[in-house]
Each structure stands twice: as structure tokens, then as C-alpha cells.
Image: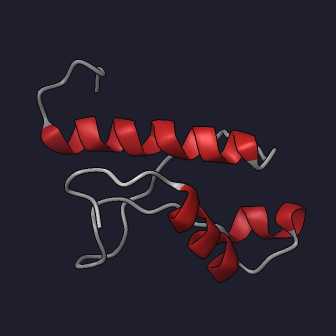
Amino acid sequence: MPEHSHDPIEKLRTEVKKNLISVLKDLKVDTTFELEVPPAGMGDFAFPCFNLAPSLKKSPNDIAADLKERLPELQGVT
């Protein structure tokens, strides 16, 4: 969907992805990814951290916690 979409979820997806790319660049890891659709009731997007575990030498849970700390807060995102 084009970035100029009026769909608020797509706008949010674009903003989340942009912020993730910035944080991943700071961590010097691959920034090629797509946000995934999580199981029902688990949110609107997901970013699995399993593939980052070997290069960052951390557990996926620790990586997720680190990303959460580094990502800026966005209105409407919890």
C-alpha cells in the first residue's frame, strides 16, 4: 500500500517500521524485514527477534526488551 494511504493502521505500520530500521542500524544489524501479523488478540504487528539472536548474542526476549526501550513512543502504540 502506498505511503500516502489514509488507512491509519498502514500509517502506523510505516512509522513503526521506520523507527525499527533506525534502531536496528544503531545496533549494526540487518534492516531487511517485514512486520508480521501476530495471532489474534496479540496486537496489529509483530517483529520476531529470533533471527537477531545469533548476531546480538542475546535471547529473543532480551532483544525485544532492548528494542522496546530504544524505540520512541508513538501515539496509539502500546
Can you say whether 46 is above or below 41 in the image? Answer: above
| Quadrant for the C terminus in the image | bottom left
**Tally of marks:** 0
Q: Residue, x 59% and y 39% (percent of image)?
A: 21
Instruction: Give 58 or 40, whichever is nearer the viewer.
Output: 58
- Residue 69 lies left or right of residue 77; in this view the side is right
Task: Give left or right: position of 41 versus 13.
Answer: left
Percent x, y for residue 60? 68, 76
Task: Check the image and report above or below for 4 versus 20.
Answer: above
Q: Residue at x 67, y 71 (%)?
A: 63
Q: Is residue 33 visible?
A: no
Could you tell me residue 23's position as x and y percent? Answer: 63, 46
Q: Quadrant of residue 55?
A: bottom right
Residue visible at 84% across and 64% down? 56
- Is residue 20 something that shows in the picture? yes
Q: Is residue 54 above or below residue 21?
A: below
Picture quarter with the N terminus: top left
Q: How is the image coloured?
A: secondary structure
Going 44% across and 57% down the picture, which residue do you hit? 36
The x and y percentages for residue 3 are 30, 22
Residue 57 image offset from top left, x and y in percent: 88, 72
